[in-house]
Amino acid sequence: MKSDKSRQSAQSADLAKLKSEIIKVSKEVKGRIGFYVKHVESGQEVSLDADKVYPLGSLFKIAIMVEVFRQVDKGLLSMDEKLRLEPGSMCIGSGILQYLTPGTELTVRDLLTLMIMVPDNTASQMLWKRIGIQSVNMMIREMGLAKTSIYLPWREAFLLIIGKGPYIDLSSHEAVSDWKGCSNLDRMKIISELDRDYSNLPIEDFRRQYEEIFGVKEEKKFLIQKEYDQVFDNIGTPKEIGMLLEKILKGQVISEERGREMLDLMIRNLSTSAMPQMLAPDVPVAARSGVTSGNVNEAGIIYVTQTSHVIMCVFFKKLEERNPEKAQAAEAKIARLVYDHFARVRST
């Protein structure tokens, strides 16, 4: 029978091998990677640059979802409450609500479904305005996430990228440099002014102005868009996003029942998530991806068995080419490596 010391030594060697294999796969992508992997039941972890900050892309929507559920549980909000689709909330990019008629009413439950399963930028905008822009960061701090900062709705981010607000006459480099130098208070003031000044901007004009600069399929000016997307975004670390997912799984955000509701939405994710792509169809994966120019992120939970769960957060930033599929393919391979490794690990 192996001693505890020999078992720990073998475990460390196995984790070192897994880390080496993940790094080898990541080298297929020209960019910077940070990853955090944790087997929840055994506590085993493997990571690289997991405490460094990365642009989040659509991963910020996980935090919006959490705060919506928290406010519902507090009685501040109802899942059946109807919110009205207004021009000031309609956002370009991902989602179908931007193409619907202003004045359409949707319940909070409908908007949650669209935000997580599609994902829909307008749905996230409507929900975030309803719960309060500052409420999400307050929740994040309460959860102990010190480096994650979620404060910038994507409608305002897109407006900044097309030169609205204080950056109307500045180059991309000048705008990015100025934003980096702003205090949090200054940034919130800019966001508030954008919300006020462009609340009546027709979504058709918004979309046209963006596409004139970057193309209908964002095929133009990759380097400029990449420069914007590294800065005009919410930020977080692979480890902290993993911590948030673990809290959801364990019912430490609100309750286990609410946690299951949130994870069920993520399991039914209809967007192109990398994590399940190389796994068997019967392996549940509660995942959310975040893709912008130069950034490709994947965060989720792999249900190895009903009693064995793996948190996986793999973030790429500063990609050198417009080819998110290459990073997503690497993330799918990493998910397979992680699954195969922890399928052999006991839950206790």
Image: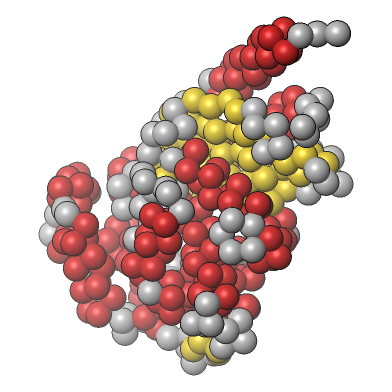
Q: Is residue 97 left or right of residue 165?
A: right
Q: Position of residue 288 (x, y in %)?
A: 60, 52
Q: Position of residue 73 (x, y in %)?
A: 57, 75
Taking the spot 43% from the left edge, 61% from the top edge, the residue there is 139
**Of residues 180 and 52, the one drawn nearer to the viewer in this rendering:** 52
Residue 336, can we see it?
A: no
Taking the spot 49% from the left edge, 59% from the top edge, the residue there is 63
Q: Residue furthest bottom?
A: 103
Q: Quadrant of the N terminus?
A: top right
Q: Quadrant of the C terminus?
A: top right
Taking the spot 55% from the left edge, 33% from the top edge, the residue there is 36
Q: Position of residue 118 (x, y in %)?
A: 62, 64
**Of residues 141 and 167, the one drawn nearer to the viewer in this rendering:** 141
Residue 183, can we see it?
A: yes
Q: Position of residue 255 (x, y in %)?
A: 64, 63
Asked which colour scheme the image uses, the reply is: secondary structure
